[in-house]
């Protein structure tokens, strides 16, 4: 449809371009809105011409407007399908970015651990070298003092010749050992320099990883905002068309009631003429029915005989079917007992956020109570994703839990997630497995609580989502 083409009902449609963020591609989606000025002129024109039109003409015009709005509704439905496709693509990209962010966080945590180990190694080597340096400095000072004593002074010292000889022997043995320690000290200094170079390179990689993580988080934030914008625009278009259709439908109903009353009076005038003709036809019909009744009586006797035979056959079939049903129920009961005895196979562990599990299912939490879920210590500002596809049934603050989300999954599963810094979805939204639904608080080392229930009973989240026919496992 062209940008300046008029709607069939006289309502002009204006194109509203919406730019897509760079992360979602350089496409442009067009939405159509009824022009407010043209709609106002149409209402004024309707009120002015209603006084000169007959009820039938007014009803016809209103029905034409309804047909036009239905055409607009179909067009909006097609556009909604296009928007839904783009929303699905955004969800897929958000899921991919969330996985990349999770991997980037794991890599950054590994780099930080390696950086801490290198810093500890560098500090230990420096302390050890400082101790060696002090010992060698003391030995060198002693040798210098001995070297400054001339031979004549050594002979005049109060010690005896034996003591002087012993000192000479000690000095002769000390010099090679001192040279070996000096060589070892040089090698240790070389290793210290290499460790410091490795430490500097590791710090550079850690800084680059942090910058990459920030870029991933910004891109996810832009895509989440784009997703919310598309959902809001689609809903606004539908509400506008629905309101106008409801208004026209009410007006058409009033006009139809008026036309029905006029038509009833016309039918009453024609009913009297038709009554006499109906009486004549009724007499002929009764005579025909009498003859037909005699024929049907004979046919009924034959039908009753066939019916008796059919009922006997149906009774035998019902008895056989009941016996088969009981045998099937017994087999199903045995299979159900076998299924309940065997634990449901886990479908893979997927936690809502990356990090270290500090409290596991069944352990005592920080208040001393038995935990019915898991507590994960995550990185500040990390993206929280849906552990499984489902529908948001609650989003917002709840008592002492802070910001929480409840997601309803298939086969009786529900996820309860608490500890958000920000929630990026709303009640009623469908989310895919791994789709971002919010962010952790932006400071400190925040904790996220994840509880998984099936049919209202808590189960171990780290065991995953079991098979549809299995029971919840502890």
Image (cartoon, grey):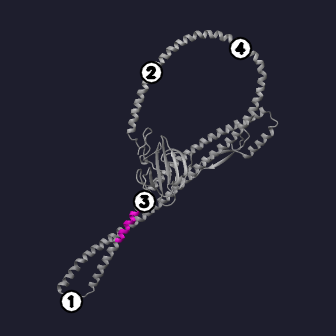
What whole-number distance in Å separates the C-alpha atoms at marks 2 and 4?
49 Å
In front: mark 4 or mark 3? Answer: 4
Of the residues under marks 4 and 3, which one precedes in the sequence?
A: 3
In front: mark 1 or mark 2? Answer: 2
4 and 3 marks in contact (CB < 8 Å): no
Q: Which mark is residue 319?
A: 2
Of the residues under marks 2 and 4, which one precedes in the sequence?
A: 4
Q: Which residue is mark 1?
A: 158
- Mark 1: which secondary structure? loop
Residue 88: x, y in percent? Answer: 55, 44
Tell me: 290 left or right of 23: right
For the stretch drawn in magenta, the main secondary structure is helix
Q: Nearer the viewer, residue 326 or 111?
A: 326
Q: Which residue is mark 4?
A: 282
122 in the magenta segment: yes
Is the residue marked by circle 2 packed among few (<14), some (14-19), or many (20+) residues within 10 Å? few
Q: Nearer the viewer, residue 473 or 62?
A: 473
2 and 4 marks in contact (CB < 8 Å): no
Of the residues under marks 1 and 4, which one precedes in the sequence?
A: 1
What whole-number distance in Å separates the C-alpha atoms at marks 1 and 4?
162 Å
What whole-number distance in Å separates the C-alpha atoms at marks 1 and 2?
131 Å
2 and 3 marks in contact (CB < 8 Å): no
- Over which residues does the magenta segment extend? 115-127
- Mark 4: which secondary structure? helix
Image quarter where the N terminus lies is top right
Q: Is residue 239 visible?
A: yes
């Amino acid at each position: 449809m062209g940008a300046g083409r008029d709607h069939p009902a006289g309502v002009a449609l204006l194109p509203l371009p919406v730019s897509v963020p760079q992360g979602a591609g350089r496409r442009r989606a067009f939405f159509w809105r009824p022009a407010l000025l043209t709609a106002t002129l149409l209402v004024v024109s309707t009120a002015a011409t209603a006084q000169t039109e007959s009820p039938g003409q007014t009803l016809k015009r209103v029905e034409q407007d309804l047909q036009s709005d239905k055409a607009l509704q179909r067009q909006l439905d097609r556009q909604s399908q296009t928007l839904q496709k783009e929303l699905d693509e955004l969800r897929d990209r958000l899921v991919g970015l969330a996985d990349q962010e999770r991997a980037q966080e794991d890599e950054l945590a590994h780099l930080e651990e390696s950086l801490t180990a290198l810093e500890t190694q560098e500090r230990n080597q420096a302390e050890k070298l400082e101790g060696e340096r002090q010992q060698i400095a003391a030995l060198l000072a002693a040798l210098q003092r001995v070297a400054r004593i001339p031979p004549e002074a050594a002979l005049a010292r109060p010690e005896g010749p034996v003591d002087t000889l012993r000192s000479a022997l000690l000095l002769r043995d000390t010099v090679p050992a001192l040279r070996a320690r000096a060589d070892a000290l040089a090698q240790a200094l070389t290793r210290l320099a290499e460790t410091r170079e490795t430490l500097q390179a590791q710090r550079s990689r850690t800084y680059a990883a942090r910058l990459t993580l920030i870029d991933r988080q910004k891109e996810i934030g832009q895509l989440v905002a784009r997703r919310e914008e598309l959902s809001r625009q689609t809903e606004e278009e539908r509400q506008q068309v629905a309101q106008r259709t409801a208004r026209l439908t009410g007006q058409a109903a009033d006009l139809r009631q008026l036309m029905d009353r006029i038509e009833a009076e016309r039918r009453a005038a024609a009913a009297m003429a038709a009554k006499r003709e109906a009486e004549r036809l009724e007499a002929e019909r009764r005579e025909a029915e009498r003859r037909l009744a005699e024929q049907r009586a004979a046919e009924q006797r034959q039908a009753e005989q066939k019916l008796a035979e059919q009922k006997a056959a149906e009774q035998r079939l019902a008895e056989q079917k009941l016996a088969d049903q009981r045998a099937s129920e017994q087999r199903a009961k045995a299979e159900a007992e076998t299924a309940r005895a065997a634990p449901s196979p886990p479908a893979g562990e997927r936690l809502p956020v990356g990090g270290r599990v500090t409290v596991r299912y069944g352990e005592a939490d920080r208040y001393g109570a038995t935990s019915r879920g898991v507590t994960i210590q995550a990185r500040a500002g990390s993206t929280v994703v849906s552990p499984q596809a489902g529908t948001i049934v609650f989003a917002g603050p709840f008592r002492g839990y802070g910001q929480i989300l409840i997601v309803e999954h298939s086969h009786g599963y529900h996820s309860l997630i608490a500890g958000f810094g920000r929630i990026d979805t709303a009640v009623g939204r469908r989310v895919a497995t791994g789709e971002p639904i919010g962010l952790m608080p932006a400071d400190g080392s925040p904790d996220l609580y994840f509880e998984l229930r099936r049919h209202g009973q808590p189960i171990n989240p780290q065991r995953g989502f079991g098979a549809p026919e299995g029971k919840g496992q502890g």
